[in-house]
Image: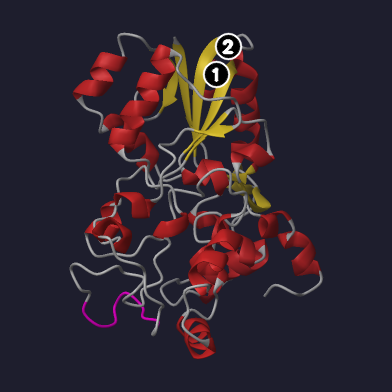
Amino acid sequence: MKFAYLLAGGCGGCDMAIVDLSEKLVDALEHLEIVFWAPTVADVKYKDLKAMPDKSVDIGFVSGMVRNKENEELVKVMREKCKILVAYGICAALGGIPGMANLHTKDELLENAYIKCPSVDNPDNVLPSPVSEVNGYKLTLPELLDYVKPVSAVVEVDYFVGGCPPHHDHVAKIVEAIVSGNLPPKGSWITDGKSVCDYCPRNPALKGKTRDFIKEVKRMHEGKVDEEECLLQQGYLCLGPVTQGDCGALCTKAGIRCAGCGGPIPPTKDFGLRAISAITSLFENEKVAKQALEKYPVFAKLIYRYCLPGSMLGEKIEVLKKKEIVR
């Protein structure tokens, strides 16, 4: 099978999750011919990808969100070249952490990074420009889009994979499913279909107990985490009940609340709305709800940390900005 991999606006962590397969990756390479995976594996240029015949690649992975016009163009090229396209990792699937930029305008982000940031020395207030000239040479940069997009906002996606990055054990299952042809219906998430709580040893249900109401809200740096008790019951707003557990609950096992990088459990469409419903239903009273808003003054950055661009709110964010509803 011919395989292509594009790193769009991501950090490269999803690439490493595949490389971390180690000897399992070597076994998979007996069945896969890598025709494009730059720069992690091979020195193949974008022009080489564009020159490939349409639908000549059996399966393609795209990691990272769509943040600039170069990302947007290459994602479209991948769709043209690949028979099956996978949004691999939460950035590609729903926008990821960079998607929180959608709560701000492009101008606000550039001004903060290049002018207002205390560590920046930029007395002339120079901002990046798509085109500039230096000593007679014309230099170009990919132009930033107005907001972050998941891959599915640009092209049709056949399968989705969560995780930041996907755990290598789950990646092994994905590769095995691809090689064997044992894939779910198109449009599906490739997932075990269980929540983080299903894998978490702190889950009261696994001990034959019921979950208590949340009596106090804490940030992770506050107090000492009990090694056995459910993080939610201790007041740490863990998103494990609504997050896919393909990671095996690694964070909660280490005493760190789940932040939702696995993405929503199918068939949930909007992770943030589901998280609000699940978490706030456990608040003991209105006092706890007010405390949550005090601890997390921008609540959207708690519940939509990994998925704002792919949410119902993300689709309308520009409209809300124009109406000055979102600041």
**Image height of 189 relative to 242, above or below:** above
Q: Amino acid at mark 1?
A: Leu
The answer to if 225 sits in the magenta stretch is no
Q: Are marks 2 and 1 in contact (CB under 8 Å)?
A: yes
Residue name at image x 52 percent, y 55 percent: 98
- Mark seen at residue 138: none
- Mark seen at residue 52: 2
Give coordinates of residue 1: x percent, y percent: 44, 9
> What is the distance, in whole Å, between disc 2 and disc 1 at their CAs?
6 Å
Q: Amino acid at mark 2?
A: Met
Mark 1 lies on residue: 49
Res 254 quadrant in image: bottom left
Residue name at image x 54 percent, y 88 percent: 286
Q: Residue furthest front?
A: 208
Give coordinates of residue 12: x percent, y percent: 39, 41
Give coordinates of residue 127: x percent, y percent: 60, 62
Res 28 quadrant in image: top left
Image: magenta residue range: 217-224
